[in-house]
């Protein structure tokens, strides 16, 4: 910024990892974990891993941010619905739990927009903001991630149970 000019940008950073990508990674985790509780926990963890990876951000003005965020929110809902629908019944709950866990930490964005405050403790939000690594020119990173995550999740959803799984169950009987 040139000296003598005033930074009129709103405080805070207008960007985030696309929620769609969080939801996709949650679906992948759910399909692999197969049980809802570990899927949920791993989903939450995956959120922070994705946020810490260099990603698209600094989307521009608040208006542009909102436009991207609303589109992204709708797409991620559609993605979540689609993955829930195509998941085999014995994995559906785990897939849903993985997606919910992966999306949960971003609940602060709509909450701030609609209610003016984050539902999380301040320390949590500071940590969440602190790990972001975003730049305006990285949209392709998000697209590549979406493509990779979507295909991985689709493959994992129907992958046969691993044989050690079966052996373990036989042992447990
Ligand atoms: Zn986040």
Image: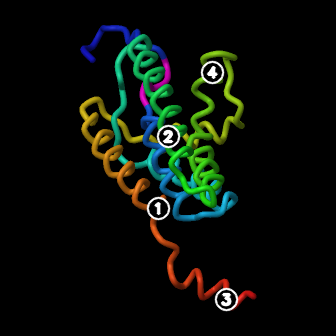
Query: Could you tell me residue 113's position as x and y percent?
Result: 60, 17
Q: Tell me, yes or no, whether the highlighted magenta stretch contains residue 12.
A: yes
Q: Where residue 134 appears, x then y in whole percent?
A: 36, 37
Query: Looking at this view, is 65 or 131 the one in front?
Result: 65
| CB atoms of marks 4 and 2 within 8 Å | no
Q: Mark 2 = which residue?
A: 82
Q: With 98 as the anchor, is 65 left or right in this view?
A: left
Q: Answer few, some or many: residues within 10 Å of disc 3's Cα (few below 14, many 20 plus, some between 14 and 19).
A: few
Q: Which residue is mark 1?
A: 158
Q: Secondary structure at mark 4?
A: helix
Mark drawn on residue 170: 3
Q: Nearer the viewer, residue 37 or 50?
A: 37
Marks 4 and 3, Cα distance to the nearest angstrom? 50 Å
In this rendering, the label closer to the viewer, 4 or 2: 2
Q: Dot 4 corresponds to which residue?
A: 112
What residue range appears in magenta? 11-15
């Amino acid at each position: 910024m040139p000296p003598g000019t005033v930074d009129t940008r709103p405080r805070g950073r207008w960007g985030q990892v696309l929620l769609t990508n969080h939801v996709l990674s949650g679906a992948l985790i759910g399909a692999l974990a197969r049980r809802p509780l570990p899927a949920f926990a791993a989903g939450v963890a995956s959120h922070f891993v994705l946020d810490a990876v260099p990603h698209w951000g600094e989307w521009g003005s608040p208006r542009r941010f909102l436009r991207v965020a609303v589109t992204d929110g709708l797409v991620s809902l559609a993605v979540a619905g689609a993955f829930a629908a195509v998941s085999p019944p014995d994995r559906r709950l785990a897939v849903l739990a993985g997606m919910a866990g992966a999306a949960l930490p971003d609940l602060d964005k709509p909450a701030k927009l609609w209610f003016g405050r984050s539902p999380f403790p301040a320390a949590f939000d500071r940590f969440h903001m602190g790990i972001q690594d975003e730049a305006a020119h990285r949209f392709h990173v998000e697209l590549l991630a979406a493509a990779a995550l979507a295909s991985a999740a689709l493959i994992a959803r129907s992958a046969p149970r691993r044989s050690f799984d079966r052996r373990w169950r036989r042992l447990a009987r």
